[in-house]
Image (tube, helix red, strand yellow):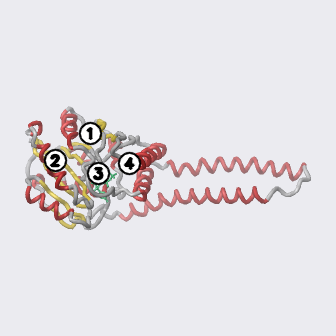
């Protein structure tokens, strides 16, 4: 029988887990799923509420349910990576713990996988269940990323996807410190499918992606997949050199052929401030990449596990 693991990163999700577990159990009980073994793997990303206790309780009461608990909060992407490294099944489905990702879509994902797709991505359509600001910020986020990065990331791409063992094994080899699966997955290639869905409302709790986190996530997305921003400084540099050359000729002309007074103070100050600001911006961009190099160079682990349950699939043959 084929084994499918549902990988669920959880950070302070105490209000959602029981209902999520119940929904997943109900769905996977249906006849359609009879020929599969379903695992659920919860990754507790250093929650400081009762998430871990609830996960343990769920694991005790249910078969094929496992958990990993990280030593502190390492972030959504690293929590997914911890799960990927742990899993050894035929297919993995990553989904959020807050019931925003409709479990009803799972059967469709599996059908597509059985048809031969290596990855089944989901694309979030703008629904009434999302706040106006979240929709706008998310749109802007993808627009900026797509201008700069060399992989095409769909607006509304979500970390709700199915991928097979082949892809999971590739992802295990991934050692980048700052992970951005929405970029890594399209970069990988393989046969991929995009499934559209309307997100549900977050059931309980608050979003963990604050504006600050979203900006930092966008920067990771841009700087992980492109050196375009660095090249930007070359283009801007060329344009400004050209402008200054023209101005130099103009100054020579004024000096030699006219007896006009010294050109105005304002224009000098404005250009100094403008060019100064621009240089700082470019240095900032270089700094961002340099910082990334610095962090990657340390080769620190992406996460640290404080405890985990024994995963039977690592011993059992799944075929
Ligand atoms: N999450 C996590 N670690 C974090 C932040 C979030 O494991 O540091 C989990 C969170 O519990 C949820 C998923 O990642 O299952 C997505 O987070 P959230 O729902 O807050 O994001 P949103 O849907 O608002 O973009
Ligand atoms: Mg959510």
Q: Which residue is mark 1?
A: 120
Q: Is mark 2 within 8 Å of ligand 1?
A: no
Q: Which residue is mark 3?
A: 202
Secondary structure under badge 1? strand
Residue 149 visible in the current orientation: no
Across and down, in percent, residue 309 comes to 13, 61
Question: Do the residues under discs 2 and 4 have CB atoms within 8 angstroms?
Answer: no
Q: Evaluate if marks 3 and 2 touch, with contact meaning CB atoms under 8 Å apart.
A: no
Mark 2 or mark 1, which has the lower sequence index?
2
Q: Which residue is mark 2?
A: 23
In the rendered image, residue 215, in percent from the top left (x then y), is placed at 44, 55
Residue drawn at 56 percent across, 59 percent down: 283
**Mark closest to the chain's N terminus, 3 or 2:** 2
Q: Are marks 1 and 4 in contact (CB under 8 Å)?
A: no
Spatial CA distance of label 1 from label 4 is 26 Å
Q: Give the alpha-carbon distance from disc 2 to disc 4, as whole Å.
A: 24 Å
Q: Disc 1 or disc 4, which is closer to the eye?
A: 4
**Number of marks drawn:** 4
Image quadrant assignment for residue 73: bottom left
Residue 120: x and y in percent read: 26, 39
Relative side of 62 to 53, left or right: left
Q: In the image, is the residue at mark 3 within 8 Å of ligand 2 by its beta carbon? A: yes
Any atom of ligand 1 within 8 Å of the CB at mark 4?
no
Ligand 1 positioned in quadrant: bottom left
Q: Earlier in the sequence, mark 2 or mark 4?
A: 2
- Pointer 4: what residue? 131
* Camera sees residue 239: yes
């Amino acid at each position: 029988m084929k084994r499918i693991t549902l990988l669920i990163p959880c950070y302070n999700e105490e209000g959602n887990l029981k209902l999520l577990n119940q929904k997943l159990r109900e769905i996977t009980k249906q006849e359609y799923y009879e020929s599969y073994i379903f695992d659920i793997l919860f990754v507790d990303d250093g929650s400081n509420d009762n998430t871990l206790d609830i996960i343990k309780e769920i694991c005790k009461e249910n078969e094929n349910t496992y958990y990993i608990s990280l030593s502190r909060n390492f972030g959504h992407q690293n929590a997914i990576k911890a799960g990927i490294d742990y899993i050894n099944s035929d297919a993995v489905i990553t989904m959020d713990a807050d019931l925003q990702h409709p479990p009803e879509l799972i059967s469709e994902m599996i059908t597509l996988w059985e048809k031969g797709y290596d990855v089944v991505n989901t694309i979030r359509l703008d629904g009434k269940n999302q706040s106006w600001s979240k929709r706008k910020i998310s749109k802007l986020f993808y627009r900026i990323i797509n201008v700069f990065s060399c992989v095409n990331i769909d607006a509304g791409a979500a970390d709700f996807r199915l991928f097979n063992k082949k892809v999971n094994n590739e992802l295990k080899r991934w050692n980048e410190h700052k992970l951005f699966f929405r970029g890594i997955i399209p970069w990988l290639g393989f046969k991929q499918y995009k499934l559209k869905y309307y997100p549900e409302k977050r059931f309980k709790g608050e979003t963990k992606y604050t504006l600050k986190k979203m900006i930092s996530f966008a920067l990771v997305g841009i700087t992980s997949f492109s050196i375009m921003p660095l090249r930007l400084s070359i283009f801007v540099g060329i344009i400004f050199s050209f402008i200054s050359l023209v101005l130099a000729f103009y100054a020579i002309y004024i000096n030699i052929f006219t007896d006009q007074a010294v050109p105005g103070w304002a224009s000098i100050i404005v250009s100094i401030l403008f060019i100064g600001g621009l240089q700082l911006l470019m240095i900032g961009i270089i700094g961002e990449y340099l910082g990334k190099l610095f962090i990657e160079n340390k080769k620190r682990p992406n996460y640290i596990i404080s405890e985990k349950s024994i995963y039977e699939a690592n011993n059992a043959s799944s075929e």
